[in-house]
Image (tube, helix red, strand yellow):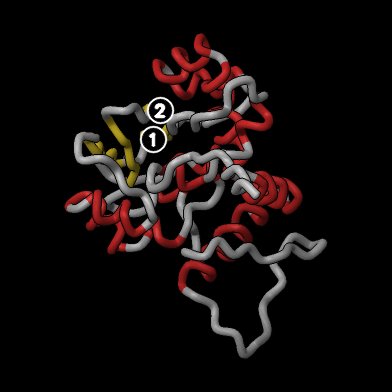
Amino acid sequence: MPHDHDDHDHAHGHHHHGLSPSGHPYRPDDDTALSRFQVMEIALRELLIEKGIATAPEIMAQVERMDARSPALGARVVARAWTDPAFKARLLADGSAACREMSIEVDALKLVVVENTPQVHNVVVCTLCSCYPRNLLGLPPDWYKARAYRSRVVREPRAVLAEFGTHLPDDVRVQVHDSTADMRYLVLPARPAGTDGWSAERLAELVGRDAMIGVTLARAPEEPAPA
C-alpha cells in the first residue's frame, strides 16, 4: 500500500519559514542553500496563496496546530484507559472514536491501539518511511525514521528493545506492528505497579512517547532508598 507523505516531514526536518505580512516566506540568508524539499514547500505555499486557496494566516494557523501536538495528548489517552475500564474497552475496539470522546481529532486515519500485557509486548514501526500517530505523539523522533530501526526492529526486536534499556522475560512474546498510509498504531503500556489510587493527571506524567511506541516501559518514579 502506498504511503501518504502528507503526514510526514516535508523537509525531513520539519522546518517552517516565517511568513511576511504579504504572505510570502522570509528567505534564509543568501549563503544558506535550500534543500529540494524546502524549495518545494515554499513554492507550494506561495501557489496556494496566489490562487486564493488559502491565506497566509490560515497556513500559519495549520503549521502552529501541527507544531503544538505533543506526546502529552497520547499520555492523557493512556492515563484515562488506565483509570476507566469502559473507556479502555472502547479505545481497544476503536481508537479513533475513543480519542474523539476526549476531543482529540485523529483526522481520517484509523488508529489501532494495542495493549501490552504480561504475555505480549507491542512495538510499532513504519518499515517504508515514518507513518506515525502525530496527532497524539507530535513529531516522530529521528531514530524512528532511521533505516536501521525500521529494518532491525522487524528482524531482531528484542535486540533493539534492549538497546533502549527494555529487557523482557523470555516468555513474553514481542509483537511488531507496521504502520501504513491510513493506519496508525498506539501502544497502551502496562500500568506501573504501585500507582493504585493515582489520578489520571498524575498517571499521565509517567507515560513517555517511547512507551507509546513500545520501545520502553511506563515506569513509576523510584522510591528513595532507605536512609
Instruction: Name the amino acid, label 2.
Output: Val
Mark 2 surroundings within 10 Å by alpha-carbon count, few (fewer than 14), some (14 through 19), many (20 or more): many
Residue 66 % position (x, y): 62, 47
Q: In the structure shown, which secondary structural element does the residue marked by tag 2 occupy?
A: strand
Which quadrant of the figure has residue 79?
A: top right
User: Front-most of 108 and 116?
Assistant: 116
Q: Which mark is residue 185?
A: 1
Tell me the residue at 41%/50% (across/down).
5
Instruction: Name the amino acid, label 1.
Output: Tyr
Q: Measure how far apart labels 2 and 1 are at the Cα level.
A: 6 Å
Residue 63 % position (x, y): 65, 51
Q: Is residue 13 above or below residue 119?
A: below
User: Front-most of 44 and 194?
Assistant: 194
User: Front-most of 92 and 103?
Assistant: 92
Q: Are marks 2 and 1 in contact (CB under 8 Å)?
A: yes
Tell me the residue at 54%/44% (across/down).
208
Is residue 78 in view from this perspective?
Answer: yes
